[in-house]
Image: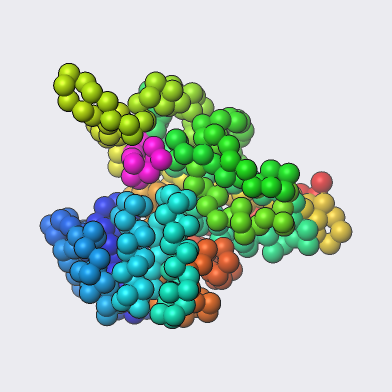
Amino acid sequence: MKILVLGAGRMGLGAAYDLAHSRQVEAVTVADIDLERARAVAATIGSDKISAAEIDVDNELAVSALMRGHDSAISCVTYFHNLKLARAAIEARVNFCDLGGNNSVVDAELALDEEARAARINIIPDCGLAPGMVSVLVAQGAQAFDELEEVHIRVGGLPQNPRPPLNYQIVFSVEGLINEYVERARVIRDGRIVEVDSMTEIETFDFPSFGNVEAFQTSGGTSTLPETFLGSVRELDYKTIRYPGHCAQFKLLIDLGLASSEMIEVDGARVSPRRVLGDMLLRHLPADEPDLVLILVEFRGISKNRSQTLRYHIIDRFDPETGLSAMMRTTAFPASIIAQMMARGDIEQKGAIPQERCVPPDSFVEELAARNINLMKSINED
């Protein structure tokens, strides 16, 4: 199979690395608007399977032409390009997945279902970490219950060696980070889909085999799960994990208006506070230092006439042997797995579909384990 990776940033590197090390993948094309950056990714991986290409993802016709000849394409570029790329994939009749990042964009992609079915391909958004991997884990865990009542998802990417003031480092797109912190979160409460403000409802707890953390509401993590599980559960939510104190510190920046996209005039120049904040975060926060990813999914319900709580948890760490961060492994590897599943025909239903409704969950978890992303499970009777 031949797979196209669009974007030669951190996640593009992670996806290309995983694809190049798959025995079933014959060729990988890494494409970026900066050809030298795409070539650098190919050189870093050092596989004969990989070739570099230059592409402007805003040029839909050129993207569609590049997609042809591949079995699947993965978008590792910023979320606001994904709708155009999904349309290009339909035109090229090539399976497509992306890393998500925005509910409105995902809704627009899923609205392409009829066209994707006519092209006999899959369009699967949100194939990164959260939403992404956790969506498939929720689908698997739900199978263990006769009556599922609650699902609580807690996920975070953290530096192994936190430093003030935010005890955080840049592990993915800073634009995506701000987006998660300012848009509203969609959850199921009392059996209804509702929206709540991000950076609220802080809780602290001991993460298994790690220690004390905080978690708070952020947008995007549930993505399509509320629609998928509406009518099946009473409660479903997602919160982002950080070291204690992070939420209050970052919320102060938001409350001061520094995450606003509204243009303001400063000394005769018009500037976007959000752009300035993003630039300052990139300048002052560490990046590419050893990181870790924490995932906790808790299910409550009835199984075999007994009330049970099922807990999934994963701790993944920076891999010094490959140089890949935990965030790259847990975000890019799931996209690679799903791209290969689509190319092999493992996903039988065609169209634009949320992954929790079409990705075979047991096979997906087996693929994670093959990459040393290990899911730990525990069950307690209530």
On the image, which quarter does residue 96 sit in? bottom left
Q: In this view, does 30 lie above or below 348?
A: above
Q: Is residue 158 above or below residue 379?
A: above
Does residue 73 show up magenta in the picture? no
Task: Name the one closer to the observer, 198 or 300.
Answer: 198
Query: Image quadrant of residue 263?
Result: top left
Depth check, front residue: 381 or 172: 172
Horizontal and vertical percent position of residue 329:
40, 55
Q: Is residue 152 above or below residue 85?
A: above
Query: Residue 107 in the image: x percent, y percent?
Result: 48, 57
Quarter containing the N terminus? bottom left
Q: Which residue is drawn at 47% across and 77% down?
A: 117
Q: Which region is colored magenta?
A: 169-179
Q: Please name the residue shown 15% across and 56% down the image.
A: 34
Left or right placement of residue 382 versus residue 58 in this view: right
User: Residue 336 sits in which quadrant?
Assistant: bottom left
**Residue extending furthest left?**
36
